[in-house]
Each structure stands twice: as C-alpha cells, then as structure tokens.
Image (spheres, rainbow, N blue to C red):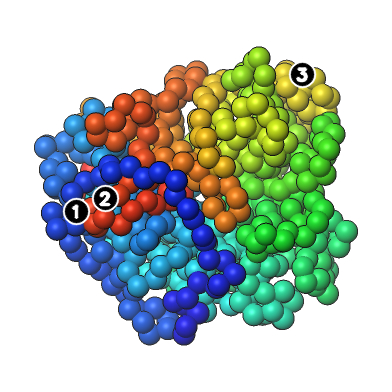
C-alpha cells in the first residue's frame, strides 16, 4: 500500500540548517556494512543497514555501554554512540543503522528505559510507522519488525512506548484514525474520528515482531466537554484523547497516559484560536488484561496561581508527559505540562484520582538565573522521569517562556520527592500561591529542588528529551542494572515544523549523590572543546549525508556484557 511508504504532504518537515560542522568519522567505504530485513504486512521488504566503524569493532578488552540516538536527516537512522566512561572513543558515533526505503519518518521517541532482553521500539512521527530493533549484539543493530500505518487503522502519529515484562510494548498514538469516520477497535468498541493526526488517539499493543496485538480506545464512549476539548473538524462526541506520555505499573495493573494536542494543528501555520486545542487531561487504564486496556478515568489538571496574559500559557495545558512511581509501597504518578507545572496524584488505583500542582518550573529558573529568571509560562517542559528508587524526579525544560531575558536557556533539573511520597495517600503539598511559584511549595512534603543545570541553545528550540543511565560497571567487569541513577542523556531538538527546533546536540549530565547536576564536558566530538555531540555534521559512518535531528535517546548494553 502506498500509505506505508509515503509521508502525508501536510506533515512534511521543512528544515533549514544555518551551520553545519565537518565533524564525523570517515566515509561509508571505511565501515563494515551489514543488513537485516523483514517483510511488512504490505508485502514489501524493509531493511536496516549497519555502518560499523573501526571504533565499533575495537573493544580493547573493555566492555562498553552505548547511547542510542534516534535521528532524522537525509536518511533516518539509529546512531550508536560510545557512552563508556573512560573509553578512548567516548562520544564517538561508532555505527549508524540506517532505515532503508522509508524516508521522512521524523524519528521521535523510543521506550523510556531499556532492560536486557528488550527490543527497541522506535516511532516515526510523520510516517506513522514503528520500527522494532534487536540491539542484543550492540553496537550492531538488526531489524526485528515493522508496524505500518495500515496496521493501526484507528490511530496515527506514534509518540512513546513502554515495554512490558513479556517483551511486548504499549505505544501512545496521538492522532486519530487513518480515515475520518467510525473506527472499530480490537475490543469491538467504535469511536468516530476526524482523521489522520486528528482525534481521538489510541493506545496500541505491539509485539516484538512488530505485529499489532491490540488497538484500544483512549476516548470515552460518552464524549467530553466540547468547550474544553476543541476538535477541528468537530466530532459528534468531543474528545481530548491525544495521548503522548505513557507509563505503566504492571504490578498495579495500571497504565497512565497524558493528552497533548490535536497534533496536526500544531504542525501547520493556521493553528485554531484559543487554548483548548491543547489538552489538560490525564487518563488511567486498567491493564489487568494486557490485550484489552480499559479506560477507567479522565482527570483534568487544575489551574495554578499564575495569571497569564495568554490563556494558552496557563499551567494545565498541554500535558506532555507523565511518569509513575516504581516501588511497591508507592502508587503515585506525576504529570508535567509545557507551561511549567508539575502535578502529582498519590494513588493511580483510585476511582477518581486527585491531582494537585506540586512544583513550577519558575523555581528552577530562579535558581539558575537568580538576577533575572525566565518565565515558566510557555517554557515547553518535556521529558519527566522518576528514578527507579523513587528518590528523584528528573525534568527537562526546553527554554524560558516567550519574552524572557534568558529565553535561549533550557534546563535539566532534579527534585527530591522522598518527603512527598512519604506523605502516603494524603499529601499536603499544593502550589497555590504566587510565592510558591518561584520559591517552591511551602508545605514540608513538597518536592525540594536538588540540582539544576542550564543547557544553552540559541536556536528556536532547546533540550526536549532525555533518558536515565540505569547501568553500572561492576567489579566483575560486567554491567549490571542499577536503581542509583548517576547520569542522564539529553537531546536538543523538538519538531522543526512546530517552530521549535534545536541546535541538534546530544549532551550527558552527571548526577551527584544528593542530586546535584553538572554537564559532562568530556562527552564531546573528537578535537572539539565544546561539550556534547553535535549532529549538525557533514560526515557519518554511512557517508556524507549532512546534518541530522536527534530526538529519542536510550542507554543500552550488549547482552553479552550485562548480567
């Protein structure tokens, strides 16, 4: 089918690169090339080709850790970077696993955390395609499956993924059905949608071979408030169901998703007026039957104490990310918005979860820029993740709000959330005064700012996505998973067509024992003094293909090197 190989014209990304470096490894002729292929449900063959440099092959007796970067350019690819502390090739791009025959995917997110034995689920935002990658033999990557637009007729625009214990994954699909009109999901229910990249979105369960195992509705059958949930064109039942963030607690049989935008209006110049095209809702599903997620609740995030000149910059909208707690004694979850607010509910198993604002990005900006802190309205907060031990909450902020003196300065910050979680099912923390916006919550159980580091990006974008390094090199010479997070990866790119681009660098941030943060200045391109790895380069292992846009990031280790 043509739809599997053609990106809709409405969503083609036009990107102008102002400056390109000549960094990079030798041309493709000096790389070892291997290819793996699968056949899609359309009968076509899809391939991934590795271009392994000499640095990839030279282990030097040392087991290595890798940073995977899902990037888009003239040819889309998964870059494999040496992320081994102390390695002589630290920061080097040792392999580019190119996607053959399907361009313009706009590579977006993968899963939030990788565990040994898992495959990597990498979504193409614009192509409505998910690539399932086998990374067991890193730095080599093999294609294990492909999920095409026709495989998910009730949803489009895949965003993020959560891999389950059985190796399957849930994916959040922000957009509506491929074709406007009624669509019937795996469970037999039907919803009416307004088409590709519209509403309502859905949740999809995908197998490790790329097959669609289930499509589940994210929209309620009865619909939602049309005054709060703008759909263009209008739907018979209004909905805010455009899931972006997705996280799971299998032990609690719960999945949490955050609604973002009727995304096609974000990707074209004539955005409908008003704030209500951006969503302010979080959804919780029962996943006791993994093949049939059941929507249990839809919660609107409450407004905060700030009064913004633009209604679209009020705290509750749009809810980009959510993250769950991890330890058995905790049942809570967090959600963050692009307008600077972080919300918390203590119990995702409750019939009607109660969410409250517990932090504002303005507090972190005030710490980083005490003389003239940027605004948090319009700050475009993004990646949000709890540490596996439930001690820290990590957050990435793209920029200062419009009109701020330091608008070009994004942030990575970390909150100590232990007191909040100790409050159990009845937390006191609530950011409900202007003083708490810039000074942090007044109640004793409010999250405490433990560390902050600016990421300066002079472009229209900045830091957007991140990943935790959940591996540690043991005394036995092998890597082991750890709950003690000491390093983060951050990518400086959003989506160019929205007007929020980025300088296309990938940075590493060190995390101290108490949560203090510092930029890893050793992780950089060879011969450069500027920290971070620049994707605006002319040469790659797969040839002189020019600049690329890095988005999803993920730490991983070859199966043979992790115990």
Between disc 1 and disc 3, the foreground one is: 1
| Residue 468 drawn at (x, y percent) | 45, 37
Whether residue 124 sits left or right of residue 55 in the image: it is right
Label 3 vs label 2, nearer the camera: 2
Q: Which mark is residue 442?
A: 3
Look at the numbered discs 2 and 1 and tell me whether their residues touch, using CB distance below 8 Å: yes
Separation (CA) of disc 1 from disc 3: 57 Å
**Label 2 – label 1 distance at C-alpha:** 7 Å
Quadrant of residue 102 within the rendered picture: bottom left
SS at circle 3: loop
Task: Look at 36% across and 82% down and name the residue there.
Answer: 44
Residue ID for mark 1 = 27
Residue at the (46%, 38%) spot, across then down: 490
Per the image, the residue denoted by label 2 is 539
- The image position of residue 147, as x and y in percent, is 45, 71
| Nearer to the camera, 386 or 466 | 466
Q: Secondary structure at mark 2?
A: loop
When the figure is inspected, residue 28 is found, relative to residue 350, above or below; the finding is below
Q: Which mark is residue 236?
A: none
Of the pair 478 and 301, the residue shown nearer to us = 301
């Amino acid at each position: 089918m043509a739809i599997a190989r053609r990106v809709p014209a409405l969503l083609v990304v036009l990107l102008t690169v102002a400056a390109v470096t000549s960094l990079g490894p030798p041309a493709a002729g000096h790389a070892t090339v291997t290819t793996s292929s699968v056949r899609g449900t359309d009968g076509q063959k899809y391939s991934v080709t590795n271009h392994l440099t000499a640095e990839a092959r030279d282990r030097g007796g040392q087991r290595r850790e890798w940073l995977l970067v899902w990037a888009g350019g003239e040819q889309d690819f998964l870059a494999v970077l040496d992320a081994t502390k102390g390695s002589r090739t630290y920061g080097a791009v040792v392999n580019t696993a190119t996607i053959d025959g399907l361009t313009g995917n706009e590579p977006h997110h993968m899963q939030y955390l990788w565990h040994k034995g898992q495959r990597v689920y990498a979504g193409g935002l614009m192509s409505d395609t998910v690539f399932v990658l086998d990374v067991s033999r890193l730095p080599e990557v093999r294609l294990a499956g492909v999920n095409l637009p026709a495989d998910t007729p009730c949803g489009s625009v895949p965003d993020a993924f959560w891999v389950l214990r059985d190796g399957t994954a849930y994916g959040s699909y922000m957009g509506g059905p491929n074709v406007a009109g009624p669509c019937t999901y795996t469970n037999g229910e039907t919803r009416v949608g307004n088409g590709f990249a519209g509403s309502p979105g859905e949740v999809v369960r995908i197998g490790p071979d790329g097959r669609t195992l289930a499509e589940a509705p994210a929209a309620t059958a009865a619909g939602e408030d049309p005054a709060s949930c703008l759909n263009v064109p209008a739907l018979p039942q209004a909905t805010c169901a455009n899931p972006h963030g997705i996280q799971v607690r299998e032990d609690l049989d719960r999945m949490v998703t955050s609604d973002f935008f009727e995304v096609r209006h974000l990707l074209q110049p004539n955005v409908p007026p008003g704030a209500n095209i951006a969503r302010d809702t979080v959804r919780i599903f029962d996943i006791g039957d993994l093949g049939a997620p059941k929507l249990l609740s839809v919660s609107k995030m409450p407004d905060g104490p700030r009064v913004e000149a633009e209604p679209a910059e009020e705290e509750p909208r749009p809810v980009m990310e959510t993250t769950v707690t991890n330890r058995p004694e905790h049942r809570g979850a967090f959600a963050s918005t692009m307008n600077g607010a972080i919300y918390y509910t203590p119990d995702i198993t409750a019939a009607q979860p109660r969410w409250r604002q517990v932090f504002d990005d303005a507090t972190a900006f005030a710490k980083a820029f005490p003389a003239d802190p940027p605004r948090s309205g319009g700050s475009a907060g993004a990646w949000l993740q709890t540490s596996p031990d439930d001690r820290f909450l990590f957050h990435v902020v793209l920029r200062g709000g419009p009109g701020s003196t330091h608008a070009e300065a994004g942030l990575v910050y970390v909150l100590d959330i232990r007191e909040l979680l100790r409050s159990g099912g009845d937390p006191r923390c609530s950011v409900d005064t202007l003083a708490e916006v810039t000074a942090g919550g007044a109640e004793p159980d409010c999250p405490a700012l433990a560390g902050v580091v600016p990421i300066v990006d002079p472009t229209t974008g900045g830091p957007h996505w991140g990943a935790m390094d959940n591996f540690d090199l043991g005394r036995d010479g092998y890597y082991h998973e750890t709950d003690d997070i000491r390093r983060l990866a951050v990518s400086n790119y959003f989506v160019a067509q929205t007007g929020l681009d980025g300088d296309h660098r990938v940075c590493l941030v060190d995390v101290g024992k108490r949560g203090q943060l510092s930029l890893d200045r050793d992780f950089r391109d060879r011969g450069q003094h500027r920290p971070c790895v620049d994707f605006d380069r002319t040469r790659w292992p797969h040839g002189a293909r020019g600049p690329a846009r890095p988005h999803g990031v993920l730490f991983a280790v070859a199966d043979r090197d992790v115990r």
